Image (cartoon, rainbow, N blue to C red):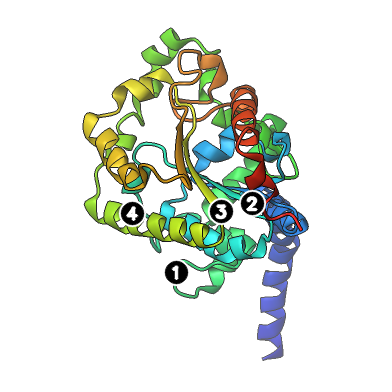
Amino acid sequence: MKKFILHITCFILPLAVVFIPMELYLRDNSYQAKSDYLTAHKEEIETLVLGPSYAWRAINPLAMDMPTASLAHEASAINTNMMLFRKFSSQLPRLKYVLFDLSLGYMENDNDQRWESNHLFNIYYDIQNYRADVKNSFLLTANFKFYFKLFCGTMKDDKNVALFNESGFVYDVADYNNLFGTYEYDTARLRASGELFKRLTYQNSIHDESYVKNEKLLKEMVNECKRRDIKVIFIAPPKFCLNNKAATAEIIERRDRFLRNFEGDEEVEFWNYEHLLEDNAQFFLDNTHLNPKGAEIFTEVLNKRLSGLPLERRQAQIP
């Protein structure tokens, strides 16, 4: 028995020496930054940003006049954003605005137990979207292949490391995320490569079950916000022109159908910036995401409009 324990120890110890530092290194990411920032500033936050990576890449919370936190995350759907809203909005006593990304096609998606980022919500927000599983408590056990490859990539070349500020906004992107930059923003080369067209149909996918579920979730969020005197502003960050031209009439109508529920409602607005900057590839990472230069412009536009809303609302909850 002692020999068996010795063999196990000799096997596990070297692995621990390698993988524990790797796990700690990988955990220092934008999820950690967002979680820490929200915790540190929850008594001050007046604006909360929710949605997928379109909003995450497009809005720099630190450049907003009002204290702002972003919990927008890559590949997150409406249901997982609602988990964040339910858990954290009640912890923000000065919250006045929820900026919720309603880009085309977003109401057609859902994050189920197979979502690749479920473990991240567990680790950083203590939110479970799956049955209890110990392996989802660590990055390397949740998806070893992905994180080992990511670690090796960052060790090999520091250009593969994204730099983010304390709010989790990426101000210097990793090379592998910068599609347009890789082709020097030359749309002719991008077209020839075929890379421009790989995700154009994504936003046009129709899923009735997800749409109905998401419509219910969003209405519940709006009602909760009204109860707490919080204004909901649905937004659509800028997209590259090819993405906008590829949008079908059906997918546009489905979003419009939902928004018609709030016509004449002063507590709910829709700010559509999909066509802002659309003809200049130099402001984009790809068809759907702004790069930091584009985000700087969009954040300034958003900030001015938000700051221009009635002063009495912005002062309403200040003791």
Residue 166, by quadrant, is top right
Q: Looking at the image, is 43 positioned above or below residue 286?
A: below
Disc number placed over residue 130 in the picture, else none: 1
Q: Which numbered mark, 4 or 3, is in the foreground of this view?
A: 3
Q: Depth check: give the residue in front, 250 or 115.
A: 250
**Residue at horizontal 34%, vertical 40%?**
105
Separation of marks 4 and 3 at Cα, in angstroms: 19 Å
Q: Please name the residue shown 25% across and 29% down the image.
A: 248
Q: Which label sits in the foreground, 3 or 2?
A: 3
Callout 3: helix, strand or loop? loop
Q: Residue 233: x percent and y percent?
A: 50, 43
Tell me how far mark 3 sits from mark 2, CA to CA: 25 Å
| Distance of label 4 from label 2 (alpha carbons) | 27 Å
Disc tally is: 4
Can the viewer see residue 221 in this picture? yes
Mark 2, residue position: 31
Q: CA distance from mark 3 to mark 1?
A: 30 Å
Label 4 or label 3, whichever comes before in sequence order: 4
Q: Secondary structure at mark 2?
A: helix
- Residue 230 is labelled as 3
Q: As shown in the figure, which amino acid type bears the numbered disc 2?
A: Tyr
Name the amino acid, label 3: Ile
Furthest toward the front, the residue is 312
Q: Which residue is mark 4?
A: 215
